[in-house]
Amino acid sequence: MTNVYDTLNERGYIKQLTHEDEIKKILAKDKVTFYIGFDPTADSLHIGHFIAMMFMAHMQRAGHRPIALVGGGTAMIGDPSGKTDMRKMLSKEEIDYNISCIKLQLSRLIDFKDDKAILENNANWLLNLNYVDFIRDIGVHFSVNRMLAADCFKQRLEKGLSFLEFNYMLMQGYDFLMLNQKYGCTMQLGGDDQWSNIIAGMELIRKKEGKNSYGMTCALLTNSEGKKMGKTENGALWLDANKTSPYDFYQYWRNIADSDVENCLSLLTFVPMDEVRRLGALKDEKINDAKKVLAFEVTKLIHGEEEAVNARTAAEALFGGGVDMSTVPTISMPLDMKNALLMDILVHTKVLPSKAEARRLIEQGGLTINDKKIEDKNAILLDEDFKNGSVLIKKGKKKYYSLIIE
């Protein structure tokens, strides 16, 4: 049986770990209960969280038990890690709704049946804490000097770190302690920006319980230039189909840089590594075959096989000269805009952010309507343009929309 450590290492997940030799041995012979935290500040996870979901899924498939800890308590404050500004405060009702959405998304990769995985909420122990007791019992074990040296605080110190946020490391360390006591959780996984918080929790367990615990961080999802991936012109690449359509999600991966294909196949799919390396080694036009595999596999994991097939079919139809309007992202305009300038319609439907961008696109020859290039910046959509009740808009080389009238 393959040690999951070797799988994680081969696929490029492991960035830092606390006790390499011990972790290798433990993962080989024991069933480990581990946890990863998810911040419920939105009603959907995004692609940056997906790498953590895959980290969990590989561990579970190897026989280990995941705890998905949603921060219903810590979200009332906000994690300063990797942030330059203080986060927006959410109500308890908003947080509870976000948690319900996140569990559905996690369930696509993690099996929660029969206690194979646990969904826990740190609000269960954080919201009823007595602050004086907490500071006496937990705060005494934290060194302010060491905390200030942590990377998660350095960035925020330049703009001003509130005492509210300064408590976050104590609370996350307390989370690890509580999960250790309640479920025998001995390992915390997380993004590399969580390293300081993970170490803090391990130290707290050692001081309070006299036990060893362990930590591993995974690489953040970055491109070959070291920049974070998952940003689109409309913001984050969300896992919720209502925020990022399956077609747009598919197209994002279909259009990534050639140099990023192998890394994304390794981290974001279960494609065997021999095949990952073969696909990643393809050159020139053939690398598009690897991108199609990547786009299909990631979309299938997030949205299901049917949506992945639909997205692939739509893309192939569009780029093959045909049009499958049913699976192209749909946008709508009100009836009273029927005789408006095409530029105004593009801005209203958020195809483009401004009239200036619309004019520039038209001047550069980058806008077509039903396969006809638009050259007049004062163009108006006519009734005859709405074939079968919709208009096919092509922006640039690869972005398509189906425009309908509400």
Image (cartoon, rainbow, N blue to C red):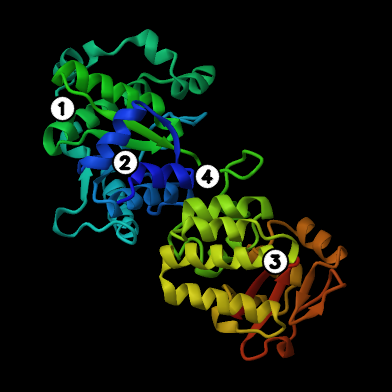
The local secondary structure at tag 1 comes to loop
Name above or below for residue 8 compared with residue 382: above
Q: CA distance from mark 2 to mark 4?
A: 16 Å
Left or right: where does residue 11 sit relative to residue 137? right
| Residue 271 seen anywhere in this rendered image of the structure | yes
| Spatial separation of the CA atoms under disc 3 and disc 4 | 24 Å
Alpha carbon distance from label 3 to label 1: 58 Å
Read off the residue under disc 4.
Answer: 221
Point out residue 249 in the picture as x, y percentages from the top left corner.
54, 63
Secondary element type, mark 2: strand
Q: Residue at x 62, y 38 (%)?
A: 226
Q: CA distance from mark 1 to mark 2?
A: 22 Å
What is the tally of numbered marks visible in this picture?
4
Q: In the figure, is residue 10 to the left or right of 68?
A: right
Which residue is outermost to the front? 1
Tell which circle, 2 or 4, labels the residue nearer the N-terminal end: 2
- Earlier in the chain: of badge 3 and badge 1, it is 1
**Mark drawn on residue 129:** 1
Inspect the image, locate mark 4, and give the three-letter code of the amino acid beneath it. Leu
The quarter holding residue 224 reads top right
Residue occupying the point 54% across, 18% down: 158
